[in-house]
Amino acid sequence: MLQFDLLATEGQARRGRLTLNHGVVETPIFMPVGTYGTVKGVMPQSLEAMGAQIILGNTFHLWLRPGLDIVQQFGGLHRFEAWPKPILTDSGGFQVWSLGEMRKISEEGVKFASPVNGDKLFLTPETSMQIQHVLNSDIVMQFDECTPYETQGHITTEREARVSMELSLRWARRCLAEFNRLANPNALFGIVQGGMFENLRDESLARLVELDLPGYAIGGVSVGEPKELMQRIVAHTPHRLPAHKPRYLMGVGTPEDIVEGVAAGVDMFDCVMPTRNARNGHLFTRFGDLRLRNARYKTDERPVDETCACTTCGSVSRAYLHHLDRCGEMLGPMLASVHNLHYYVNLMREVREALDAGTFPAFAQRFAQDRRRGFD
Amino acid sequence: MLQFDLLATEGQARRGRLTLNHGVVETPIFMPVGTYGTVKGVMPQSLEAMGAQIILGNTFHLWLRPGLDIVQQFGGLHRFEAWPKPILTDSGGFQVWSLGEMRKISEEGVKFASPVNGDKLFLTPETSMQIQHVLNSDIVMQFDECTPYETQGHITTEREARVSMELSLRWARRCLAEFNRLANPNALFGIVQGGMFENLRDESLARLVELDLPGYAIGGVSVGEPKELMQRIVAHTPHRLPAHKPRYLMGVGTPEDIVEGVAAGVDMFDCVMPTRNARNGHLFTRFGDLRLRNARYKTDERPVDETCACTTCGSVSRAYLHHLDRCGEMLGPMLASVHNLHYYVNLMREVREALDAGTFPAFAQRFAQDRRRGFD
């Protein structure tokens, strides 16, 4: 099931509520990424405590490890990974695309060698639906081809982007048929492709809308293109999607990208940035980003962000985190991941509060100013 | 300050209560090891939640990183690492010993090159006391020479063990003088050495007792000697120490070693085993040890230990932990470390309850039977 209630709008920005089989999600929302059935370095209890409402799982990776037999035995991903709230799974399309030379795409699907054990595998719209049915994710993504921005220096042409977009459309129809055949009780999202070409985006969108899916995503952004191009597509596409359905901008992005995405009418975001950057000592704060490895933090007794209510900022100093990083101690990435995810989750809370109060433009302006301010 | 109240005895086993500057510790106690100011892979909040009462810090490592200036700025280790309860620090003696060929021992102290940056360093009884004064640990260990069991195939002779033991005694006196000169408000423990020779152990013990220190440790066991030798020394030494002072068996050991240590009159234990083994997929349970990497756990829906109340056993399965290990996911060691430490902390709770009830011998027997039982 999926029910989407649009609670308020302000310009193109939207405040909504998504009701799924495993719970309610207030939007706009950021979804932490849990590739292998774990948000890297973060306890499920910590995710709940910081207010995460929905997390991602990865069809491709979970198919390879632990494998479907195991997840099936547990009745789905929720019990296996001890996360009772909603889960969205991607389709595997992005990962097979990332395999580069190791995969072969045809009308039928994608052939590739398992990066785990070399097994020859074949992922199709139908198998993606079958896998996601077993995972029992609340939101199932269609299998698509993620149109690259460039391939070995060659920028994708409009003609190539059209061929790719049309393949994704045909795959969307096959996904819907298989999703229905499986009587999957969850919700299938379509993915708008079309590369950096607005006319192709419009065509993809229009033909997906004909399928009357319960939600739509914007894919094929944040795939290596210049920032201006990403911003152009994000400004162009979301508000053209059906107003009464949730809109998901895949793989985006920085805090600034997300606030811009909300302004452009996006409801849902995911990105590995908070956890990946945490592991590299890159911390997000209200007043800009903090590079923990900078020697200036060696003696800094302050928390990462004095305005942050996370357990990391509530207990330890920048100096301690700097020390943990220097010693290669696991607790460093653990504490940093909790902080960064809390930053993203809290940012979305503030975004929703601003939308509830009808003050989103002022919020967005102050947010951008604060982030540029930096700190001593 | 240190106050030790002996609440009950049963044979040589003792139930006690240790009052330190940062809190009260019920004994017998297991102390998780926090080498660099972090118990590896475990949040301070998790340690508190599982009932840890006192943790270790490492003088040698903390001296090198973050360095004394930083810890001094924080007023000691407690605030730096966000652990408000008692801390015991070792003296650095064991670590300089572990450096092997890289160090040179003289009457004055130990010269060595920093393993971090090659700096020439000199650790003496006085500098060890000065460092531990800055760390502000509740229990300060004397600087000693850890007598090796063997060196490159050569088993330490009685003569060599005597020379080493006597050096540690002279260092104990220098430590006490420096500890008093610094007016350290915490408690200094002496360390009984003497290798595998009971007569030397007796001599070391007698001469340390003359110093009237508030507590005593047994060092130089679990240094590579055969298990029977360790058991012989552990059976010989603890009950000869002053009855009204706490007794600490350094670096020991397996759950079985610890229960035997309690039976022999030991009050305090520390060991890296629960956290180190956790990172290698070796889990402790009531019914024996579980090797997570064994393929039999791939589909096992049960918790690690069905009798365990830790958050790991309360939320995830052996199959999930097996999967995390296979994927090299950080959450694997995190969940395993919480379980193993909880196992040790809970074992000591059960030991104390048995001593409170006057049923320790029956407990020890059932414990050993259960551990040998194994599981399907």
Image: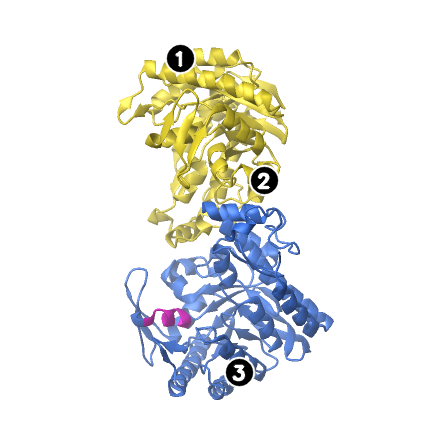
Chain colours: A blue, B yellow
Residue type of the residue flagged with mark 3: Asp
Whether residue A67 appears in magenta in the rendering, the answer is no
Where residue B202 sits, quadrant-wise, is top left
- CA distance separating discs 1 and 3: 86 Å
Q: Reply above or below: B2 against B303.
A: above
Q: CA distance from mark 3 to mark 2?
A: 52 Å
Q: Quadrant of the C terminus of chain B?
A: top left
SS type, badge 3: loop
Image position of B137 (left or right of A166): right
Which mark is nearer the camera, 1 or 3? 1
Identify the secondary structure beneath mark 1: helix
Kind of residue at badge 2: Glu
* Magenta stretch prevailing secondary structure: helix
Are discs 3 and 2 less than 8 Å apart at CB? no
Same chain check for tags 2 and 1: yes
Q: In the drawing, does residue A131 fall left or right of residue A314? A: left
**Which segment is the magenta one?**
A92-100
Q: Nearer the viewer, residue B71 or A117?
A: B71
Residue beneath label 2, please? B48
Whether pointer 2 and pointer 1 mark residues with C-beta atoms closer than 8 Å, the reply is no
Closer to the camera in the image, B286 or A365: A365
Which residue does the numbered mark 3 point to in the structure image?
Answer: A212
Tell which of A15 and B149 is nearer to you: B149
